[in-house]
């Protein structure tokens, strides 16, 4: 919740140990802290909006085919993937729904004058639609998604264990091939050319076990600043994979020698789809993470490198298309080994004011893409005020406030994120109750 109020900014401290293992030895509370476990009150938003409420659908699954059913899977996904916020204007597939049929509709119009892709009203739309970021082990190696929850266990001699459950890495991208992209720009079709739409997808879920070591090293003397506290850490993670999806199927049509489509021509299917689930495959892997942090006179800089070296292997089933509509199915594996790191750099400083304390910070990272955020928190007694600005798959900002009492905290924030597929800016009001035990 502190992070949401600062546009996703992550301040140095033990709460960021997943991104930088050196923070396991870092003192808690140097830049404030969250008060214990936070209840995701925003998930109540699933029930308050018929478009995202799955309960009627669970009672009667057949109602999904009813055109009057208000449930929208895209709205449901947007809300459940932001469990701390009541989304004000979540993503909705209604933008593409033809009211005459009740179903989403994208029209591809081919004529002698060219090619056009529109919604049901004839308004041109872009074909590059995305939901998350599609990533398979071919690009991320053994880097598993951030855990849904993580249970740390401190051991002796600066050692620790952590158990986690992850489900993420979800991505879905629909994009035209180069031929179709060029045709959309020029409005002209070429003879004997294949025009296709590709669907890249990925998802994975499983269990993780981490074993780490972090310690404070001898102080480092910095001229004009004095002694600096230096921390270092390393962490190894092993995972057992429960489910996995990775694919790049495409569907297209080919023009004839005159640059026209034969209306009786069957679609051309290409690509593959690999999947695994309990009873039909599994996965396992290991990876190594490294981190350092330096703190001097209330200012901290930390660098974390996840997946400094990683190995992963999944076994499952692969469906392949090579022009026909019927795929071939065969047992298959996906494996990887190598150095494909995710970097995380963050910094923060403390300013003691006449009334209260101000924390300022920033972070910069690269995983599947570049992200950066800046923000701060003003603390006066039990009250907290927060603000931040960042870029993470689009421009984000956050405003937040909180109250910290003995054994509990109350927090609220105004958040933004980019809507999946439809792309507009979604606003949310986040609320949480934190409990300490």
Image: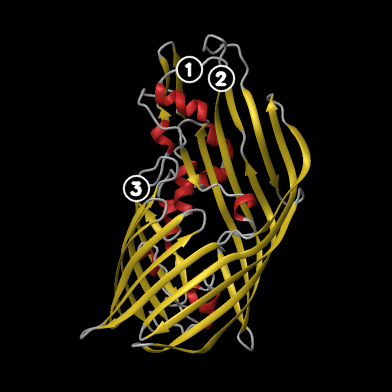
* Image point (57%, 59%), residue name: 145
State if disc 1 and disc 2 touch (CB < 8 Å). Answer: yes
Q: Which residue occupies the foreground of this view, 91 or 18?
A: 18
Pick whichever of labels 2 and 3 is earlier in the sequence: 2
Q: CA distance from mark 3 to mark 1?
A: 35 Å
Q: Is residue 24 left or right of residue 338?
A: left
- Secondary element at image label 3: strand
Which percent across, then down, holds residue 193? 56, 19
Q: Which residue occupies the foreground of this view, 240 or 37?
A: 240
- Residue 219 has which mark? none
Query: To which residue does mark 3 refer?
Result: 425
Pick whichever of labels 3 and 1 is earlier in the sequence: 1
- Secondary element at image label 2: loop
Which percent across, then down, holds residue 54? 51, 47
Q: Quadrant of residue 386?
A: bottom left
Which percent across, then down, holds residue 350? 32, 81
Q: CA distance from mark 2 to mark 3?
A: 37 Å
Query: To which residue does mark 2 refer?
Result: 193
* Image point (49%, 44%), residue name: 131
- Residue 189 has which mark? 1
> In the image, is residue 230 above or below residue 12?
below
Whether residue 53 is visible, yes or no, is: no
Residue at the far top: name it. Answer: 258
């Amino acid at each position: 919740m502190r992070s949401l109020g600062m546009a996703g900014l992550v301040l140095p401290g033990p709460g960021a140990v997943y991104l930088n293992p050196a923070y396991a030895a870092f003192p808690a509370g140097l830049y404030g802290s969250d008060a214990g476990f936070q209840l995701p009150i925003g998930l109540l938003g699933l029930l308050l909006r018929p478009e995202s409420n799955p309960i009627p659908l669970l009672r009667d699954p057949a109602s999904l085919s009813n055109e009057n059913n208000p449930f929208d899977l895209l709205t449901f996904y947007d809300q459940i993937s932001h469990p701390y916020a009541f989304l004000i204007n979540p993503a909705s597939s209604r933008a593409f729904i033809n009211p005459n049929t009740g179903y989403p509709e994208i029209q591809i119009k081919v004529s002698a004058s060219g090619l056009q892709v529109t919604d049901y009203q004839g308004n041109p739309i872009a074909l590059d639609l995305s939901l998350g970021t599609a990533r398979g082990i071919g690009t991320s190696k053994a880097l598993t998604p951030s855990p849904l929850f993580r249970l740390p266990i401190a051991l002796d001699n600066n050692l620790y264990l952590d158990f986690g459950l992850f489900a993420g890495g979800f991505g879905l991208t629909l994009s035209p091939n180069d031929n179709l992209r060029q045709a959309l720009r020029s409005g002209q079709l070429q003879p004997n050319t294949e025009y296709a739409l590709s669907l890249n997808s990925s998802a994975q879920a499983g269990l993780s076990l981490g074993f780490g070591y972090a310690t404070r090293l001898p102080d480092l003397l910095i001229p004009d600043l004095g002694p600096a506290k230096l921390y270092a850490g390393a962490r190894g993670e092993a995972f057992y994979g429960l489910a996995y999806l990775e694919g790049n199927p495409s569907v297209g049509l080919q023009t004839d020698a005159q640059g026209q489509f034969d209306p009786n021509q069957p679609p051309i299917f290409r690509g593959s789809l690999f999947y695994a689930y309990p009873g039909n495959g599994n996965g396992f892997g290991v990876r190594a993470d490294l981190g350092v942090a330096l703190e001097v006179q209330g200012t901290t800089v930390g660098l974390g490198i996840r997946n400094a070296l990683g190995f992963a292997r999944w076994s499952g089933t692969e469906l392949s298309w090579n022009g026909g509509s019927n795929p071939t199915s065969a047992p298959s594996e996906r494996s990887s080994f190598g150095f494909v790191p995710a970097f995380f750099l963050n910094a923060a400083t403390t300013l003691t004011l006449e009334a209260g304390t101000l924390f300022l910070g920033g972070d910069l990272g690269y995983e599947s893409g570049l992200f950066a955020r800046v923000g701060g928190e003003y603390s006066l007694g039990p009250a907290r005020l927060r603000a931040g600005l960042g870029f993470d798959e689009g421009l984000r900002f956050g405003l937040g406030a909180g109250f910290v009492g003995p054994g509990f905290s109350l927090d609220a924030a105004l958040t933004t994120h980019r809507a999946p597929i439809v792309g507009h800016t979604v606003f949310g009001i986040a609320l949480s109750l934190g409990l300490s035990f």
